[in-house]
Image (tube, rainbow, N blue to C red):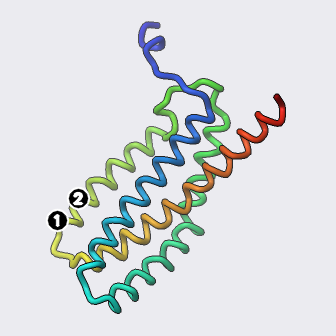
């Protein structure tokens, strides 16, 4: 009973906004790291590798990440109106995030040249960034619907 009263609860709209912001920030962070690794190599090579990463990001977005976001949005829409702020992600999602952080640290410390890692970071970061717009589209509809009904 006491733990339940200490749980920070927010509206479903806030959960959707938080999820979108988190996905945007992570996508920008990963693409930013990739940019810094591309910036120290020959511009022509960087453009080719960056373009490869961008094309792969579109594919990863289309075939993977957008589907993950859609499942998460469906789950969020089924939650009660006021839910724990940490529910913007599933427990399994938190475990995957932890795994990805550890994997990223291992890759950054590996002997793999940073320009090649930058392709991977551009791919994943770009796909995550693009996927974040699903949350914003839903949030926009919820806000517009609320304004319409008032």
Q: Residue furthest top?
A: 1
Q: Is residue 35 left or right of residue 61?
A: left
Front residue of 100/122: it is 122
Return the residue at label 2.
Answer: 105
Quick check: marks 1 and 2 in contact, CB under 8 Å? yes
Q: Residue 77, how many percent across, how many down?
A: 67, 38
Q: Residue 2, how many percent across, how many down?
A: 43, 7
Count of numbered circles on the image: 2
Q: Residue 15, how many percent across, how many down?
A: 56, 36
Q: Is residue 140 left or right of residue 122?
A: right
**Position of 137 relative to 7 (above/below):** below
Q: Quadrant of residue 132?
A: bottom right
How packed is label 1: few (under 14 Cα within 10 Å), some, or many (20 or more)? Answer: few
Return the residue at label 1.
Answer: 109
Q: Secondary structure at mark 1?
A: helix
Front residue of 123/74: it is 123
């Amino acid at each position: 009973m006491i733990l339940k009263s200490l749980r920070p609860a927010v509206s479903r709209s806030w959960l959707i906004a938080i999820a979108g912001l988190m996905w945007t920030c992570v996508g920008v962070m990963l693409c930013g790291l990739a940019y810094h690794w591309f910036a120290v190599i020959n511009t022509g090579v960087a453009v080719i590798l960056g373009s490869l990463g961008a094309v792969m990001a579109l594919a990863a977005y289309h075939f993977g990440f957008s589907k993950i976001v859609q499942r998460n949005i469906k789950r969020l829409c089924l939650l009660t109106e006021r839910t724990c702020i940490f529910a913007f992600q599933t427990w399994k999602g938190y475990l995957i995030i932890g795994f990805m952080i550890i994997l990223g640290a291992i890759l950054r410390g590996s002997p793999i040249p940073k320009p090649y890692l930058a392709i991977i970071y551009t791919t994943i970061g770009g796909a995550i960034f693009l996927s974040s717009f699903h949350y914003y589209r839903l949030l926009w509809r919820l806000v517009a619907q609320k304004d319409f009904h008032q």
